[in-house]
Image (tube, helix red, strand yellow):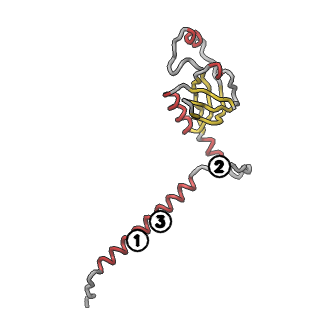
Amino acid sequence: MFAPIRAGGGRHRLRRALRRRRRMMAAGLAMTAAALAAAAPRTDQQPRRPGRDAPAAAAAAQDMVRAPVRIADAAAASLVRPGDRVDVLAAARVVARGAPVVAVPSPPAGAQGLAAAGVDGGGFGGGALIVLSVPRGTAAALSGAAASSPLAVALR
């Protein structure tokens, strides 16, 4: 009529449940790792065939932003032209590598008079402004570095 009661049977069920839970956790972690690996950007430097990675290239181009950067040394910034690639340095560390220069705006008409008088419009010295095309993360790093130290450029 009724199944016999087994002493210690609950312990066996508990072990089985824990084993099943561990397996589910391991499977979930494996799936998460696979998803993260698939979503990570490519780091290999193999030449790409045209048309093969067009969607990936379009997605990468959408993550690029134009970041205005104030360079502390205006004379050094005057050497930079649109199309040049530069490294941006802050406090002896490289913040951006090989960033293409998009524009070098000329200073406003009254800005040179203010700089000669020693009046600073904010930031570290008068300097000069350049516009770089960089990924969003690099733009954030440039902004943070500019808040804490003067920036310099190195031409490539």
Q: Which residue is mark 2?
A: 55
Q: Quadrant of the N terminus?
A: bottom left
**Which residue in the structure is indicated by mark 3?**
27
Q: Residue at x 53, y 11 (%)?
A: 118
Q: Is residue 11 left or right of residue 48?
A: left
Residue 24: % across, % down? 43, 67
Instruction: Give the Cα distance between marks 1 and 3.
Output: 11 Å
Which residue is painted at 60% across and 35% down in the image? 96
- The x, y position of residue 142, in whole percent, is 55, 32
Task: Say what amino acid the circle numbered 1 marks.
Answer: Arg
Q: Quadrant of the C terminus?
A: top right
* Element under disc 3: helix
Q: Which image quadrant is residue 77 in?
A: top right
Nearest to N terminus: mark 1 or mark 3: 1
- Counting residues from the start of the chain, the first of labels 3 and 2 encountered is 3
- Name which quarter of the figure residue 10 lies in: bottom left
- The reply to whether callout 1 and callout 3 are in contact (CB within 8 Å) is no
For the residue pair 59 and 34, the one nearer the viewer reads as 34
Q: Quadrant of residue 9?
A: bottom left
Residue lying furthest front in this view?
92
Instruction: Residue 115: give x, y in percent of width and height.
Output: 56, 12
x and y, in percent, of residue 132 in the image: 62, 31
Q: Residues within 10 Å of mark 3 (few under 14, many from 20)?
A: few
Foreground label between 2 and 1 = 1
Q: Which element carries disc 1, helix, strand or loop?
A: helix
The residue type indicated by label 2 comes to: Pro
Give the residue number, with chain letter if any, for mark 1. Answer: 20
